[in-house]
Amino acid sequence: MTKEKQQWGSRVGLILAMAGNAVGLGNFLRFPAQAVQNGGGAFIIPYLVCFLLLGIPLLWIEWSLGRFGGRGGNHSTPFILNEMGKKTMWKYIGVFGIFTNVAVAAYYCYIESWTLSYVMHSVVGTFNGMDQNAVSNFFTEYVDIEKSTLGIPYEAVVFYLLCLLLNTFILSKGLDGVEKVAKIGMPMLIMFGIFLAIRAITLKSGTDGALFDGVVGLNYLWTPDFNSLSNPNVWLAAAGQIFFTLSVGMGTVHCYASYLNSKDDVALNAMSAGWMNEFVEVVVGASIVIPITVGYFGVDGMLEIAKQGSFALGFKTMPYLFAQWGPILAPIAGVMFFGLLFFAGITSSLAMGTPWMGFMHDEFGWSRKMGAWSFGLFVLIIGLPTVFFYNYGVFDEYDEWAGTNSLFVFALAETILFAWIFGYKKGWEEVKLGADFKVPEFFKYVIGYVTPTLLVIVFLANIIKPDGNNWGAAFSNLFTDGWILDDSSLIKKITMSSLRTEIAQTTDATHLEFLKKKFNYTLLARGILIFSFALISYLVYRATKLRKKTF
Amino acid sequence: MGTTALTLMVCVQVTVTLITGYFFFKVLRAPIDKGEHLEMPDPLAEDPDKDLLAE
């Protein structure tokens, strides 16, 4: 089989694709929810500090690793890391850079399909005349796939398949397809976002059923509570937000950067894509959901909804609020909001397909079409349980292990490789090679010492999170009560402690039945993830054998 | 809207916008391709009638 050479068509296309990879639903839903829960305006201080000390260095590390691997014809992390680390172990750590993408795409495409479906429901006016409870129930019924919301049987499944098909088709066109979507999607997303932000800020109490001005929400979001800066949870939340918003620790940045020429700039490209993500998050994303929600529910109501998570803000609330804007503006706002979420989603999910395609092409000579369709099939097989058993926690389990913990493990490993094994001085030369701007020398030491240390702290903090997330009390009571773990700590999650306790304490037979099913489906989800990781590891093993035969 | 909140919002959003714009326009103005190209120079470029076999 002949190998097809792929390359980025233009530098702007690459930047938009990279920014599109980073910009996701979290920019519009997760960031504002995190900010209001962690000190409002003061959250921006730890957030920007973490962007400088964690975000930018990680972006440079990943771009440099990608270009470094691409020089040797490697476009996926197992062999990129192997080339830098020169030890077999790194190949298998690199498996995370393919596994995470396949597993995250499995449930991420499901979220993406909700946005597509909500665009359609906004156009046909499904939400008109519904009260907030009805809109909230609509989402609950939508994910309960046995119920039909628009006469389409298994509507959630239909939209999931449609979305996956669209992703696979675009991926089969190679980097050209990805670049075209980014060039259309990113400007549209920013345009829709600016329109909605203007509408949110100019929302006046007494008009369109609003109880408060939109600026009341902005005021709450940006009023700093400086006391929160002494709370370690706020810093951990900021580090987590920076980490997830930039899509680092996934292997997608490496893959995109591996298609650069050997002396192309990475320093400026990474800064441009990273800051574009910040613009979408801090300027556009922060100005839509919170002002609109506060306009109708007040600050207390908004906080109550935000506590229930990002989906509660986005899918259970916004359609009801848009419906208040009259017969013309309501569908327009719905299409724009869910349309922008769709573009944010698809530019990220497309990026998730490229590491698998790059790997299969490099190692087994698969064409991009075969790579794309095999990716689609893989995602479909492991993704359907997230659709069918959403209410039993399969979706959350994927998000926890593939979408959160895998990222930390991989980012920590690649940072240690780059800074301490390859050596941060040599690594710094890689970052500066071909740079189109003068990279501040200060970051050499940040990459060498600060970023790895910060990652270790954040990771450890997640593993041993204390009861009630109260670090002060945990340390002061260490010698009297011992270290009591919170249910959301990684150790307790591994043992499913919270679910086991709930099962033990439940007396209601129906609920007990549900919890037992949830327990089994959680095990099933973990089994699927472990099997997927093992399968990719086996492919890496086969690829290594093939390489030895060839050379 | 409170003065502190307004000041903080304007300062942060304007700064982020300016930095984003700065880097994006720097990308637009930077040289497009510095990559290594593996193509060999054409030996007949200067003298098309050159007898390569004789060399």
Image (spheres, rainbow, N blue to C red):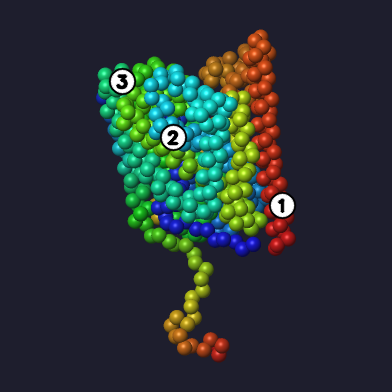
Q: Are marks 2 and 3 on the same chain?
A: yes
Residue A533 relative to residue A173: left or right: right
Question: Percent x, y for residue B11?
Answer: 30, 34
Instruction: Reply above or below: A89 against A460.
Output: below
> Chain ID for label 3?
A
Residue A440: numbered disc: none
**Residue at the spot of label 1:** A542
The 10 Å Cα crowd at callout 2, few under 14, some 14 to 19, many 20 or more, is some
The 10 Å Cα crowd at callout 1, few under 14, some 14 to 19, many 20 or more, is some
Q: Residue furthest top?
A: A507
Q: Quadrant of the N terminus of chain A?
A: bottom right
Whether residue A535 is visible, yes or no, is yes
Q: Quadrant of residue A529?
A: top right
Residue A210: numbered disc: 3
The answer to whether the residues at label 2 and label 1 have Cβ atoms under 8 Å apart is: no
Q: Report the Cα–Cα distance between label 2 and label 1.
A: 45 Å
Earlier-in-chain disc, 2 versus 1:
2
Question: Percent x, y for residue A380?
Answer: 61, 40
Earlier-in-chain disc, 2 versus 3:
2
Judging from the image, what secondary structure is the residue with disc 1 in?
helix
**Residue at the spot of label 2:** A120
Q: Quadrant of residue A477?
A: top right
Q: State the residue at coordinates (48%, 50%).
A: A178
**At label 3, which amino acid type do we have?**
Ala
Q: Quadrant of residue A107?
A: top right
